[in-house]
Image: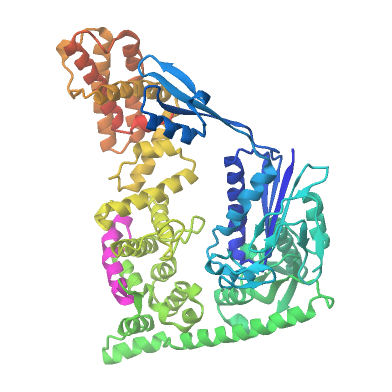
C-alpha cells in the first residue's frame, strides 16, 4: 500500500507552537482522508524550527465505491414531489428508480445511487489547500506576492489581498509525495498562493542551503541528516540533554535540568551543539532563582551547580544551531557578554530592593523608644500599590481592591482548611506587595518568589513567607501544590476570586482562547480540594450555577486523567453537586462496586427496571411512588419489596455518614431479589392495579439505587 509524505517548510516557527502545530497537521490531514473514504495503517508527525512533516504509511490507493439509498415519495404523490425527488437523486425519470412496498405506507420510490471511489492522489490534492489555508495557528501573518491588493499581479501571481494565505511565518515550500514503499513515487502538485507542491526540500539554513530532491520518507530523513537537520524533536531533546549533562560532569558540575526550557531549546535548533559559558563569581551573590530566570529567559541557557552542592556555579550551558569552525568560541563569548549584562541589571534590582529593608534590630529599638506603629517594608509596598491605584482589570478594580476581596474570602476559608486565621490574613495582606519591587518589575516570573524572600528577610513567620510564594500554585497539572495550610487557603481564595470576578463581567473562556488562564485556575481549585481533602460547598462561595458547571468540566478532566470512567463520573455528578471531594469519593466507591460481580448483575437488573419504567412513562403512565403490600401476590415480588426497604434504609444511613462503600454494599443485597423478580414475575399483569403496583416496586428499585448513582448513565 502506498505512503504519503508531506512537508510544509517556512521561516522559523515559534518553539512554543511547534509540537501542537505538528499534532494539528496530523489530525487535520488524517481526518480529512478518512472522511473521504481512505484508510491508513499509521501516521507520525515531526517538526523542526522551519518545517512541519507528516509521514503516513499504508494509505489506501483509492476510496471505496459508495452505494446510497435515497427514499422518495409515494408512487401516488403529486408530480411536483416526484420531480423534486428525481432532482435530488440525480435521476432522469422515475423509470430509473425502484418501487418498494411497505405494508403500512404503501408503495414508494427509492433511488439507488452509486458513487464511484476516487484515487487517493485526487483526494489529497483536493483537501490539502483547504487544510493549509485554514490551519489553526494562534497567531499568523500574510506574506508573498499573493498578499498584494486584488487587481495587482507580480511574477505570474495575482494579488488576493485579505483572501491570501495566513501562516505563522512566511510559507516557503511544500513537499508532497505519494507512492509505494519501493517503487517510484509521484508528486501531488496542488497549489496555495503560487506555492506549488513538489519533491524538493532544503537543509540547514547555513550549512546546507541547497535544494534536495526527495523520493520517499527514508531518503528524506537521511538527506536532511546529511544536510545538518535532525528531524525528530525527541531525538534533539535527548542529544541536548545528554550532551549538556556530560559537559557539566566533565567540569565537576551537575546540570540544573529544566524540561520546559529543554522543550523550547529543542525547538530553536535543527542541528544542536552544546557549549559552556561562564560569568563572574561575584554575581552568585544574587539569589539563585534570579540568576536561573535571567539566564533562562534572556538567553535560553541552562545553569549548573557544583556536584553534590546546592548553590549555583558560574558556568552555564548554551545550545547553538551552528557547527562553528572555531569550536564555538565566538558564540560562547557573545552569549557570555549578554549574560553578564543581564546579571548586572538583576544584581542592581536585587540590591536596591534589598536595600529598602531596614535592619530589624533598628526597627525594634525605634518602636520601643518612640512607641511608633511602624510599617514593615512589604506593608509599605502594598500601601504604595493601593495609593497608585494599580489596576488589576478595568472592570474588576485595583490590586488593592482585589486584595481586600481575597482577604475577606480567605477569612471564610481558613477554618475549612484548618489554617491559622491570623497567619492567613497576614499572608493575604502581603501576597501582592512584591509587584512593586524592581526585581519583579523586570522579571514578572519572580512574583511570589521574591515576596517570600523579602518576607523572610523582614522576619515574617515561615508559614506567611511560604504562602506568599505558594498562593500562585498550582500553575498546571504537574505543578506542586502549596506546602502548608496557610498557603492552601490563600491559593484557594486567590483563584476563586479570579474566577468569580471574571465570570461576573462575562469574560469566560471560549473555545481554545483563555486569556486569563481561568481553566488553569479552576483546575488548581479542583486539585487543592481533592488532593488536600478540602471540603467546600462551592455554591456558597461562587453563587453561580454556570461557574459550577465550569468546575464540573475541570473535575471531569482531572478524574479521567486519574483513570476514572467518564460514564461513572456522569452517573454521580448532578448539576447541583458543589462538594467536589464528595463527588470524587462517590466515583471511587462506584468504580469499585460496578466492577464486582454483584455490581455488574445489579446494574443489569436496574437497567432493565429503568427501561421498563421509561417505556411506561413515555406512554404517559403515572408511576406511583408507593407500593401496596396487599397487591403483592407472588413471593418474588414480596421478597424484592422487603429487600428494597432494608437496602434503602441502610444505604441512606451510610450516605448520611458519607460511607459510600457501605451504601454500595447495602445495595448489592438487591442483586438476588431483582434477578428473581424478573425471572418469576410478569410486570404487565392483566389486572391494572397489580401492574401499577409492580411498576411502583420497580420505581422503588430505581430510587434506591439512585441514592448513590444514576445507573442509567453507566455503560454495560
Q: Is residue 397 magenta?
A: yes
For residue 224, above or below residue 26: below
Quadrant holding the N terminus: top right
Position of 431 compared to 88: left or right? Answer: left
The answer to which image quadrant residue 704 occupies is top left
Position of 551 compared to 596: left or right? Answer: left
Q: What residue is shown at x 62% (from left), y 76% (from top)? A: 295
Q: For this rendering, which residue is in front, 407 or 263? A: 263
The answer to which image quadrant residue 313 occupies is bottom right
Q: What residue is shown at x 19% (from left), y 9% (from top)? A: 687
Q: For this rendering, which residue is in front, 426 or 271? A: 271
Bounds of the magenta segment:
396-420
Q: For this rendering, which residue is in front, 566 or 229? A: 229
Percent position of residue 119, x then y:
68, 40
Percent position of residue 211, x then y:
80, 64
Q: What residue is shown at x 45% (from left), y 48% (from top)? A: 558
Q: Is residue 8 magenta?
A: no
Q: What residue is shown at x 74% (from left), y 74% (from top)? A: 276
Colour setting:
rainbow
Residue 42 visible (yes or no): yes
For residue 184, above or below residue 416: above
Percent position of residue 483, x then y:
44, 61
The answer to which image quadrant residue 323 occupies is bottom right
Amino acid at each position: 500500500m502506498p505512503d504519503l509524505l508531506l512537508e510544509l517548510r517556512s521561516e522559523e516557527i515559534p518553539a512554543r507552537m511547534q509540537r501542537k502545530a505538528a499534532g494539528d497537521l496530523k489530525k487535520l490531514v488524517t481526518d480529512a482522508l478518512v472522511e473521504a473514504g481512505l484508510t491508513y495503517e499509521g501516521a507520525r508527525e515531526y517538526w523542526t524550527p522551519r518545517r512541519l512533516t507528516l509521514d503516513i504509511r499504508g494509505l489506501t490507493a483509492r476510496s471505496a465505491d459508495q452505494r446510497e439509498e435515497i427514499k422518495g415519495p409515494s408512487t401516488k404523490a403529486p408530480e411536483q414531489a416526484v420531480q423534486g425527488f428525481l432532482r435530488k437523486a440525480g435521476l432522469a425519470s422515475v423509470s430509473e428508480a425502484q418501487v418498494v412496498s411497505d405494508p403500512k405506507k404503501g408503495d414508494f420510490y427509492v433511488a439507488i445511487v452509486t458513487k464511484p471511489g476516487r484515487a487517493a492522489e485526487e483526494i489529497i490534492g483536493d483537501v490539502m489547500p483547504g487544510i493549509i489555508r485554514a490551519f489553526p495557528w494562534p497567531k499568523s501573518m500574510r506574506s508573498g506576492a499573493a498578499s498584494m491588493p486584488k487587481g495587482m499581479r507580480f511574477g505570474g501571481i495575482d494579488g488576493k489581498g485579505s483572501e491570501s494565505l495566513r501562516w505563522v511565518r512566511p510559507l516557503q515550500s511544500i513537499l508532497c509525495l505519494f507512492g509505494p514503499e519501493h517503487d517510484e513515487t509521484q508528486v501531488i502538485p496542488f497549489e496555495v498562493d503560487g506555492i506549488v507542491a513538489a519533491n524538493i526540500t532544503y537543509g540547514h539554513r547555513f550549512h546546507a542551503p541547497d535544494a534536495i530532491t526527495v523520493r520517499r520518507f527514508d531518503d528524506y530523513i537521511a538527506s536532511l541528516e546529511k544536510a545538518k537537520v535532525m528531524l525528530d524533536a525527541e531525538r534533539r531533546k535527548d542529544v541536548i540533554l545528554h550532551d549538556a549533562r556530560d559537559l557539566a560532569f566533565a567540569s565537576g558540575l551537575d546540570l540544573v535540568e529544566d524540561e520546559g526550557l529543554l522543550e523550547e531549546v529543542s525547538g530553536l535548533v535543527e542541528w544542536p551543539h552544546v557549549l559552556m559559558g561562564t560569568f563572574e563569581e561575584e554575581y552568585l551573590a544574587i539569589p539563585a532563582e534570579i540568576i536561573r530566570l535571567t539566564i533562562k529567559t534572556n538567553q535560553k541557557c541552562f545553569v549548573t551547580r557544583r556536584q553534590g552542592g546546592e548553590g549555583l556555579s558560574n558556568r552555564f550551558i548554551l545550545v547553538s544551531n551552528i557547527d562553528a569552525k572555531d569550536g564555538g568560541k565566538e558564540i560562547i563569548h557573545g552569549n557570555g557578554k549578554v549574560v553578564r549584562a543581564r546579571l548586572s541589571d538583576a544584581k542592581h534590582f536585587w540590591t536596591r530592593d534589598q536595600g529598602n529593608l531596614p535592619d530589624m534590630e533598628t526597627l525594634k529599638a525605634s518602636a520601643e523608644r518612640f512607641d511608633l506603629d511602624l510599617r514593615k517594608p512589604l506593608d509599605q509596598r502594598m500601601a504604595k500599590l493601593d495609593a497608585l491605584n494599580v489596576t488589576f482589570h478595568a472592570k474588576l478594580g485595583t490590586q488593592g481592591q482585589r486584595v481586600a476581596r481575597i482577604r475577606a474570602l480567605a477569612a471564610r476559608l481558613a477554618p475549612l482548611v484548618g489554617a491559622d486565621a491570623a497567619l492567613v490574613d497576614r499572608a493575604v495582606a502581603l501576597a501582592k506587595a512584591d509587584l512593586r519591587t524592581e526585581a519583579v518589575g523586570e522579571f514578572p516570573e519572580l512574583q511570589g518568589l521574591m515576596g517570600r524572600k523579602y518576607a523572610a528577610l523582614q522576619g515574617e513567620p515561615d508559614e506567611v513567607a511560604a504562602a506568599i510564594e505558594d498562593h500562585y500554585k498550582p500553575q498546571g497539572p504537574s505543578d506542586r501544590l502549596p506546602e502548608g495550610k496557610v498557603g492552601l487557603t490563600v491559593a484557594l481564595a486567590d483563584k476563586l476570586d479570579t474566577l468569580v470576578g471574571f465570570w461576573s463581567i462575562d469574560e469566560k473562556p471560549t473555545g481554545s482562547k483563555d486569556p486569563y488562564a481561568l481553566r488553569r485556575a479552576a483546575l488548581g481549585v479542583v486539585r487543592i480540594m481533592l488532593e488536600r481533602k478540602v471540603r467546600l460547598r462551592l455554591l456558597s462561595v461562587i453563587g453561580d450555577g454556570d461557574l459550577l458547571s465550569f468546575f464540573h468540566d475541570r473535575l471531569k478532566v482531572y478524574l479521567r486523567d486519574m483513570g476514572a470512567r467518564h460514564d461513572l463520573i456522569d452517573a454521580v455528578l448532578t448539576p447541583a453537586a458543589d462538594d467536589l471531594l464528595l463527588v470524587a469519593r462517590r466515583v471511587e466507591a462506584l468504580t469499585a462496586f460496578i466492577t464486582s460481580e454483584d455490581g455488574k448483575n445489579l446494574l443489569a437488573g436496574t437497567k432493565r427496571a429503568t427501561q421498563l419504567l421509561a417505556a411506561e412513562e413515555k406512554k404517559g403512565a403515572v408511576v406511583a411512588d408507593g407500593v401496596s403490600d396487599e397487591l403483592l401476590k407472588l413471593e418474588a415480588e414480596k421478597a424484592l419489596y422487603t429487600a428494597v426497604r432494608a437496602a434503602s434504609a441502610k444505604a441512606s444511613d451510610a450516605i448520611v455518614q458519607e460511607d459510600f462503600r457501605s451504601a454500595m454494599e447495602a445495595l448489592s443485597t438487591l442483586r438476588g431479589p431483582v434477578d428473581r423478580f424478573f425471572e418469576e414475575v410478569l410486570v404487565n399483569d392483566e389486572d391494572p392495579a397489580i401492574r401499577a403496583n409492580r411498576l411502583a416496586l420497580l420505581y422503588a428499585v430505581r430510587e434506591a439505587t439512585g441514592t448513590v448513582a444514576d445507573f442509567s448513565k453507566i455503560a454495560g
